[in-house]
Amino acid sequence: LVDTSLNDIEDVTGVEKLNNTIASGVTMAFFHADWCRNCEEIRPTVEAVSKDADLDFAQFIEVNYDDNTDVFEDKSVHTFPQLLFFVNGEEKSRLKGKSHSQEAITAELEKYRP
């Protein structure tokens, strides 16, 4: 079990909270499950991206499957891990699976730099 309280990524629960959180600015959302080995493998990369001072224009959130199946359904996330990128509430892209480098995730975020 991952203790998500030890990172800089905000835990988001519920569809309304997610929609309010992503409503303005650039947001990267990490959709995962605590028991998912692939999620566990990409977590250090996601956390490193969230701590990158050059990406201070973006906010970073995570959504845990076990507590938020309604959010996964609402955003059509049927496998994990997935990274969803939002600008002012609109989904712009998503990266699926564990095989994304810190550089690749950073490059995806840079596309949406204001």
Image (tube, rainbow, N blue to C red):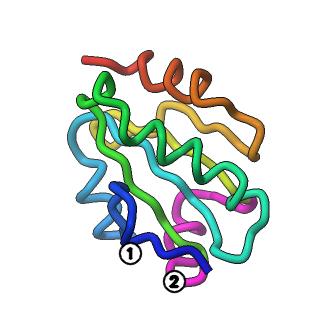
The image shows residue 106 at horizontal and vertical percentages of 49, 24
- Taking the image as shown, residue 45 lies to the left or right of residue 91, namely right
| Residue visible at 55% across and 32% down in the picture | 93
Q: Can you tell which mark lies on residue 34?
A: none
Whether residue 68 is situated above or below residue 55 in the rendered picture: below
Task: In this rendered view, identify the residue nearer to me: 85 or 90.
Answer: 85
The image shows residue 105 at horizontal and vertical percentages of 56, 29
Secondary structure found at label 2: helix
Q: Which residue in the protein does label 1 denote?
A: 13
Residue type (three-letter) at the residue carrying disc 1: Thr
Whether residues under marks 1 and 2 lie with C-beta atoms below 8 angstroms apart, the answer is yes
- Taking the image as shown, residue 81 lies to the left or right of residue 91, namely right
The answer for how far apart the CA atoms under marks 1 and 2 are is 7 Å
Residue type (three-letter) at the residue carrying disc 2: Asp
Secondary structure found at label 1: loop
| Residue visible at 60% across and 38% down in the picture | 94
Whether residue 112 is situated above or below residue 100 in the rendered picture: above
Whether residue 70 is situated above or below residue 6 in the rendered picture: below
Which mark is first along the chain, 2 or 1?
1
Tell me where the magenta segment starts and ends, as one range. Answer: 66-79
Q: Which residue in the protein does label 2 denote?
A: 67
The image shows residue 23 at horizontal and vertical percentages of 24, 47
